[in-house]
Amino acid sequence: MATLTITDLQVSVEGKPILKGVNLEIKEGEIHALMGPNGSGKSTLAYALAGHPKYEITSGTIEIDGVNVTELDANERARLGMFLAFQYPVTIPGVRVADFLRHAVSNRRDPERKEGENLMPMRDFRKELKARMEELGMDTEFARRYLNDGFSGGEKKRMEILQMAMLQPKFAILDETDSGLDSDAVKVVSEGVNRLSGPEMGVLIITHHERLLEFNKPQFTHVMLAGKIVETGDASLAAELHANGYATIRERHPEEAAEQSSEQEESLASV
Ligand SMILES: Nc1ncnc2c1ncn2[C@@H]1O[C@H](COP(=O)(O)OP(=O)(O)O)[C@@H](O)[C@H]1O
Ligand SMILES: [Mg+2]
């Protein structure tokens, strides 16, 4: 069974320690929700898992099926089945959705593939792309568009879901805290994750959107405070946090709560 194992993960950004020992295990077929106040380190965990170069792992390990991927770069991790939904939605001039996906899928299917070699045959790729787009109720014209060029919020989310459908990652990390997400975008993600998640994928949803978690009921809810996971519960913990906010969490973890608020003041002061 595919497992993502995060052990005592410590991560710094520009020399500043942000994650202070995160332990988490996600197995295929599981949905985990990660919650926590702003600035607690949720996105940092997502980027560190994906292998973003700015997020320096100073201690601890990330393993996929027992293989230590901590030293691998983002592309190598993606090939092994790690998927972070577009966080920094790049526009790549002149690259169409279909071309982008064909390369990404070829890398995923053949992790040893070298650039320019062994691209998935166009006919097979087209057939598969069409099938996935039909399943997701997407207009096939979308694949001809230039990647993220003038995409609406909902279209960016459709792109993520399509990418996920094509890549079939082992572990999908969705950082959906963006408060700017409109209702169309939330619907696309909710339904897309619901359709794509299954026994062969582990999902980590970082969100405050109640709807997303209603549609995709997590078996585990983790709460982060000051760069640590301070509590883990089931779906009812997410519901409790939606209803009551983080006050009770702060009360139960005064030390981390104090650290969290002083850090927030610091980062506010530095703006
Ligand atoms: N790229 C970055 N550059 C500088 N500081 C960062 C960066 N990313 C995160 N941080 C800092 O790390 C802390 C955690 O941020 P983040 O992971 O974005 O929290 P969350 O996603 O829970 O709101 C914050 O104090 C933030 O200022
Ligand atoms: Mg965030």
Image (tube, rainbow, N blue to C red):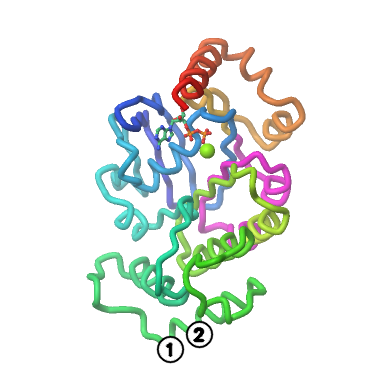
**Residue at figure coordinates x 57%, y 32% from the top left:** 222
Q: Disc 1 on helix, strand or loop?
A: helix
Q: Residue 110, how many percent across, how many down?
A: 31, 69
Q: Disc 2 on helix, strand or loop?
A: helix
Tell me: is circle 1 under 8 Å from ligand 2. no
Q: Residue 202, how many percent across, how many down?
A: 51, 51
The amino acid at mark 2 is: Lys
Q: Residue 12, how many percent across, how many down?
A: 34, 30
The CA distance from mark 2 to mark 1 is 6 Å
Please give the range of residues in magenta.
193-221
The amino acid at mark 1 is: Arg
228 or 17: nearer the eye?
Answer: 17
Task: Judge whether residue 197 is colored magenta.
Answer: yes
Query: Which image quadrant is residue 220 in?
Result: top right
Task: Judge whether residue 161 is colored magenta.
Answer: no
User: Which residue bears the numbered disc 1?
Assistant: 123
Label for residue 59?
none
Query: Which residue is outermost to the right?
Result: 243
Is there CB contact under 8 Å for labels 2 and 1? yes
**Residue at figure coordinates x 60%, y 44% from the top left:** 178
Query: Which image quadrant is residue 159 in?
Result: bottom right
User: Which residue bears the numbered disc 2?
Assistant: 127
Q: Residue 137, how many percent across, how many down?
A: 67, 74
